[in-house]
Image (cartoon, coloured by chain):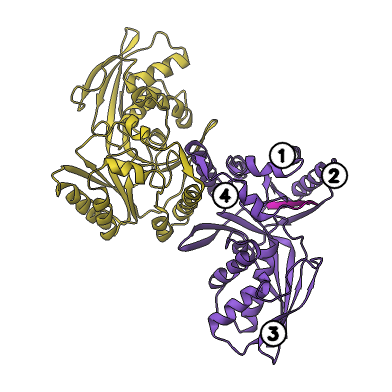
Chain colours: A yellow, B purple
Amino acid sequence: MNYIKAYAPATVANVACGFDIFGFAIEEPGDIVEITRTERPGIVIKDIFGDGGRLPREASKNAVTGVMLHLVEHLGLADFGAEVVLHKNMPLGSGMGSSAASSVAGIVALNALLDEPLSRNELLRFAMEGERIASGSAHADNVGPALLGGFVVIRSYDPLDVFTIPFPGDLYATLVHPDIEINTKDARYILRDEVSLKDTITQMGNVAGMISGLMQSDYELISRSMVDVIIEPVRSILIPQFGMVKQAAIEAGALGCSISGSGPSMFALSRGADTAQKVAKVMAEGFKQVGIDAHSHVSAINKTGATILEQA
Amino acid sequence: MNYIKAYAPATVANVACGFDIFGFAIEEPGDIVEITRTERPGIVIKDIFGDGGRLPREASKNAVTGVMLHLVEHLGLADFGAEVVLHKNMPLGSGMGSSAASSVAGIVALNALLDEPLSRNELLRFAMEGERIASGSAHADNVGPALLGGFVVIRSYDPLDVFTIPFPGDLYATLVHPDIEINTKDARYILRDEVSLKDTITQMGNVAGMISGLMQSDYELISRSMVDVIIEPVRSILIPQFGMVKQAAIEAGALGCSISGSGPSMFALSRGADTAQKVAKVMAEGFKQVGIDAHSHVSAINKTGATILEQA
């Protein structure tokens, strides 16, 4: 095999109450990576489309090729050579798991080109390295769902313990990206290092409710559990119109609404595609009222994660 | 109906990672309450057995009769009269949910005597008042499982949101009570008011893992999730031999082992009754090595909660 084209989806990390431990994948948008084997050893970036020239072109500094170099080194393939093309189909620094989608598409493409030496679960550590290259911290709450699909729990980082849980079939996500940018490092920096025991207990209760609601298809319980008393009160300050947009989403029928990842995108979960569409409309309007352009996406929860689109 | 005899079981609150939000009931031991209707209005305590004379005999100050007075007042039954007998079958201040078992047996007995004006879920608030009378704080993590049975989650106190979750059929509890006493108020007082964000994330991951493991009958996941980085490191200082007893339980095959409620009792969960028995033996021996008598109980998870034993 000499050519692979792979796709990995956008993802929503944190999911209200589950800071650093919950994430889910949506169906679209997503990034595409093409890899073509070359005679000459070494991995090089041939082209990046859709990033406005902002991503590094040097292979070791770019998340996509950076994770590929790690995998090639891990497998001891000193002679391996490839040219890589990345198609960015979502904005950088958006809270939609942009870097994760690229890293995961890259690592899945390379693994396929090499005839699947590693399982999806084994690829997770490599994809996490892409997050370290992109944002300085090897988080799994975007790469986990981008790779595995579904609703993902990161129980522990040390040792790494990641699993998917069942979720109801009629659960739809709305993802709205306002045209402003937040740096992931800044979004982390403003968080307090300490949490009150009271808030910790509240958040644990909501985490328990969220897992139980998802696994038992109890939409009301999911709705009651989509409450974040720790992170959202701090980070929402960085998002103009946050309170108004959230309220509009709830009034339009969303089960809950919060910040996607470290923002500025906001997400909502709804029962049924129609409600999710209505929610998308009012959320985008909320941003537009103050002159901020907003792009919305409505999607079922992605069940498969990254996929191979073409091979030759 | 003029006479009721009701039973409510011992319970394990917190269950390692779920401080204030998790609890489960065991089958035995449990407290028994007998109520006999009287012509004369008012609720009086006729006898209490097994408390060594330590519980208050004045109706409004005793948790059992205190909750009954609340219910009678709530129902507007000014003429109601009854004599109450309480049989304590577990030690006070043991971390086994002693006051909860008494309050729940009392409220369930009274509700049955009055021909079930309230549902089990509606009785929860009254039973919680018993906890306030006994310990100053209306917690639900013992009264919830004593009343409803099974594995209970308290998602929220305000508004009260309590539900049970499925658990694997081969899950057995070991409960070991060392013959020392810890005051619940003291056990709460030594806790820090603040928790690091890092520990909060770790604990949330374990809460998610515990719920998912229980609901999917994944014993390994239950085992990995029975980790408490917030409360156990502080409270375990109050329990002599804690580390040694816990390690012995794990080595004997327990999925996990921690403090039951606010202690000093310790509990373990195991797959299968045989393992739970072995675990009980080594845990009790651990205490006896330093001259502390310990009583152990092995039980399946109680599926029904409080029950009516006799009526006439």
User: In whole angstroms, how far apart are the C-alphas of marks 3 and 2?
Assistant: 44 Å
Q: Magenta residues, as a range?
A: B171-181
Label 2 residue SS: helix
Callout 3, which amino acid?
Answer: Ala
Magenta highlight on residue B251:
no
Dot 3 and dot 1 within a common chain: yes
In the picture, residue B232 is in which quadrant? Answer: top right
The front one of A157 and A73 is A157
Residue tagged 4: B18
Residue tagged 2: B288
Residue tagged 3: B82
Mark 2 falls within which chain?
B
Q: Residues within 10 Å of mark 4 (few under 14, many from 20)?
A: many
User: In whole angstroms, how far apart are the C-alphas of marks 3 and 1?
Assistant: 48 Å
Q: Residues within 10 Å of mark 3 (few under 14, many from 20)?
A: many
Which numbered disc covers residue B250? 1
Mark 1 falls within which chain?
B
Can you give x and y, in whole percent of width and height, for residue B9 in the image? Answer: 70, 64
User: In whole angstroms, how far apart are the C-alphas of marks 4 and 3?
Assistant: 38 Å
Report whether residue A296 is seen.
yes
State the predominant SS element of the stretch in magenta. Answer: strand
Magenta highlight on residue B174:
yes
